[in-house]
Amino acid sequence: MEFKREQLAPGVFLTAIGTTKFKSATLSATFLTPLERKKAAVNAIVPYILRRGCGSWPTMEAVSTRLDELYGGVLESAVRKKGESQCLGLIGSFLDDAYTLDGERVLEPAAELLCQVLLEPAVEEGVFREEYVAGERENLLLAIRAQMNDKRQYAMARLVREMCGDEPYGVDRLGDEADAAAITARSAWRAYQDLLAHGVLELHYCGSAPVERVRAALEPLVERLAPLRGETAKLDCQVRENRAGQEPRTVVDHLDVTQGKLCLGFRTKGACIWREDYPALLVFTALYGGTATSKLFMNVREKLSLCYYASASTDSLKGICAVSSGVEFDRMDQAQSEILAQLEAVKAGDFTEQELQSAKQAVVNVYKSVPDSRSQLEQFCLTAAVSGVWEETPQETVRRVEGVTAQQVAAIAQGMELDTVYRLMGMEG
């Protein structure tokens, strides 16, 4: 498996992964743009409008028919958030040419279809079709409202919004309901034009074709995009530390729920993907609350039965660690105290060699599995594109993780600063 990355034009990049491991190939186009509160919703709707149809294939059914002709290919819209960047695009999955009948080529017509959907949207009166905008606006509103149905995810989203309310990171990938409701065909068209002109375009391929052929297949897309380009947007992600003397905030919501949610947000004191101690951050997260052998799981959940679940996760682009737990309303204080006590234990190096090795192995397994999945490879490359960290392959991360020491893990824990506590309580809790 070979990674090759090159710049095809200003702000346009191709990452090609040559492999014969999969029967299907991935071909995607993703615009990266700074995450902004007022633009998030209107940006988020664009990939879904594009998927509704294009000049050559003006309806969703027509696009699907064309995909069927390409051995049952798939083309899906995607809206993601990486650090403080919004990632908007189309991800295609097609039969790899190595498995077609009589050596038929799929890459070139798949790239042509991707180009058509991306650059030839169905329009009326110089903007997106009102019918398509109205339908996708309603879908976007439903998706935003549906986030509240999963209270575990909702509580984490509320923690992030409260913790990073004055930062781009506090913006949801889909934007908010009010902005989504205000989207018009004209505002969506302006957002689309802005992405074409200023977004960083990441083209991704994973399959058996050589990079020269992939480049040639995508050349029409790059050439047609060139006249529309302006100054490329600058991507950034600010990793903050708590202000000196800042006390943690506690935010409490009351909803009609039967199980409470307790979330704690920590700043990592600068530990992130760009620092040398990044592997130690990964191991710390696994040891503290990232696995079934972690401190939070074994002690807070299993030994003390204070939580229905308790886990920790880290956004390595933003330098934030969050603990998520499900707790009875009357055990909130006790659960919070024990979650913090387990952090103090890691700070003091109070963990066994077996715990350390289990945490390292869990992280190693995650990175070793990346080459086994086209979707994980695409996600890995997208993170690398946003962060600019291309020199470290999954194999290199594995090597560095295996060398992490107990002292390095304790040092990461010592840098953790509690920023915000979020509690979701019942109506009478």
Image (cartoon, rainbow, N blue to C red):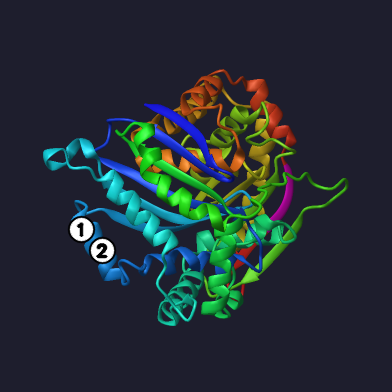
Q: Residue at x 58, y 75 (%)?
A: 187
Task: Judge by depth and name the residue closer to the eye, 64 or 255.
Answer: 64
Local secondary structure at mark 1: helix
| Residue 202 in sight here | yes
Image location (x, y in percent) of residue 225: 50, 54
Quarter of the rendering occupied by the C terminus: bottom right
Q: Which residue is mark 1?
A: 68
Q: Are marks 1 and 2 in contact (CB under 8 Å)?
A: yes
Amino acid beneath label 2: Ser
Task: Judge by depth and name the residue closer to the eye, 424 or 237.
Answer: 237
Image quarter of residue 368: top left
What span is in magenta? 417-421
Quarter of the rendering occupied by the N terminus: top left
Does the magenta run of residues contain 238? no
Image location (x, y in percent) of residue 131: 41, 81
Image location (x, y in percent) of residue 152: 51, 59
Q: Main secondary structure of the magenta part?
A: strand
Left or right: where does residue 3 sit relative to residue 166? left
Local secondary structure at mark 2: helix
Amino acid beneath label 1: Asp
Find residue 64 and name its label: 2
| Residue 325 in sight here | no
Q: CA distance from mark 1 to mark 2?
A: 6 Å
Task: Judge by depth and name the residue closer to the eye, 70 or 271.
Answer: 70
Query: In the current view of this chain or complex, which residue is farthest to the left?
Result: 102
Q: Residue at x 84, y 51 (%)?
A: 246
Image location (x, y in percent) of residue 418: 73, 47
User: Within 10 angstroms of label 2, few (less than 14), some, or many (20 or more) residues?
Assistant: some
